[in-house]
Amino acid sequence: MLSYSARTKFLIGTFVVATLFTISACSSNSVADKRADSEARDEHVQVHAIPVKLQELRRNVESVGSLFALEEVTVSSEVDGKVDEVLVDVGDRVERGQPLVNVSTIELKLALDQQRALYQQARARLGITEESDDIKNVPDAAEVKKAAADLKEAEEAYKRSEQLLEKRLIPRQDFDQIDARVHSARAAYDLAVQSVQNLRAQLPQYNASVELAEKKLRDAVIRAPFKGQVKERVVSPGQYLKVQTPVMVIVSMDPLRVRLKIPETMAGLIQIGDRLLVTVDAYPNRAFSGKLSRINPSVDPQSRTFEVEALLENLEGLLKPGFFVKARIPSRKLDPGMVVPQDALQYSYGIYKVFLIQGDVLKEQEVKVGDLSAEQVEIVSGVKAGDMIAVPVKGQVLKDEARIKLVD
């Protein structure tokens, strides 16, 4: 066995060897890291050099709003009756005049037959043929003809009795009776003429009653007032409807209305007929085109904005009433501004930045941006016109103080 002093010397020796080995390993790693850093610095990032340009920019009016149906109507029943059939449901597309609901027609047909019978009865009393709608002369009516014949017979009897009375061949009492009969026949004739005239006046009323009954029969088929889609259905087969009972809600889907709030400071930049582009969250990579159709003449004193309305094309039916929208309206105002390509702009943690080219090294520079477009972005501050900035070649990553290689 080793003595205490020998064991102590052995442990101290082992510790020294381990320490030297660790220092050697760390030194090797440090050298490797430095070599890797040196190699990284020697790598050149490939970029395009693009100057910051000063050019005329068309100002855009930005706003948000919502979509609304062009038209929305609650279709109601125009007749009383039981629902026989419901032909469409929620979400169905309908054309103008397309049947939506069928109402029972039994009572309506009976009412039409009754009105037609009254109309034909009046025509028959007047002696009207199928070829005409009215009599030419009142005396041609059968009722007047009979009254006229009775009056003529009474007048002839009066003349004969008058001659006989002068010769004292008949008593005065008989003559008075004949005279009274003449007055009665004349009154009957006048009454017949008046009756025919009243019947002639009532004839259009009878005809209108027939037409009204025919309309009610047609209205038993409830139809769509315009092209659109069914938003709501509130009726079922077998349900009894009263006049003005709602059955469907129809909305017109193309075009749609978009209503936007515009700051009062932008009032001079837009006018009716201006085109606009609208985006919605449901289709983030697609823009929809429209045209301003109305501008509210007054400003809301609370929000200091005014409302505008545009008609938005919806041929494919992708948009729906109620969608939240973001809109951009190109104005007629032109201002000078600095622009760079979209690819030159970097965004990180709420900060926009570009990389200035200084010799063969990149310099990171924070910037403030203005209007954005699909190809370029306006730089409000951070750079000046003529500065050269880097646009990375596809697959390259830009870093501050990285060495670069310019490519065409």
Image: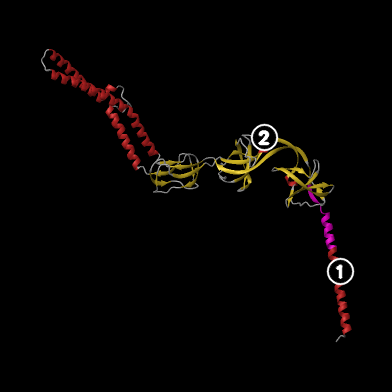
Q: Which amino acid does label 2 sit on?
A: Gly
Q: Quadrant of residue 58?
A: top right
Q: What stretch is highlighted in magenta?
A: 31-47
Residue 112 position in % (x across, y down):
34, 37
Where 179 sits versus 265, above or below?
above
SS for tag 1?
helix
Residue 131 position in % (x across, y down):
32, 26
**Residue lying at 70% horizontally and 38% vertically, measured from the top left:** 59
Query: Which residue does the numbered mark 2 point to in the structure image?
Result: 268
Q: Which amino acid does label 1 sit on?
A: Ser
Where 225 sits versus 3, above or below?
above
Residue 151 position in % (x across, y down):
21, 21
Q: Quadrant of residue 294?
A: top right
Q: How is the image coloured?
A: secondary structure
Query: Which residue does the numbered mark 1 point to in the structure image?
Result: 24
Name of the residue lying farthest toward the front? 172
* Main SS category, magenta section: helix
Name of the residue lying farthest toward the bottom? 1
SS for tag 2?
helix
Q: Quadrant of the N terminus?
A: bottom right
3D distance between C-alphas at marks 1 and 2: 76 Å
Q: Quadrant of the C terminus?
A: top right
Q: Which of marks 1 and 2 is nearer the N terminus?
A: 1
- State left or right for residue 82 relative to residue 68: left
Where 147 sits versus 85, above or below?
above
Magenta includes 229? no
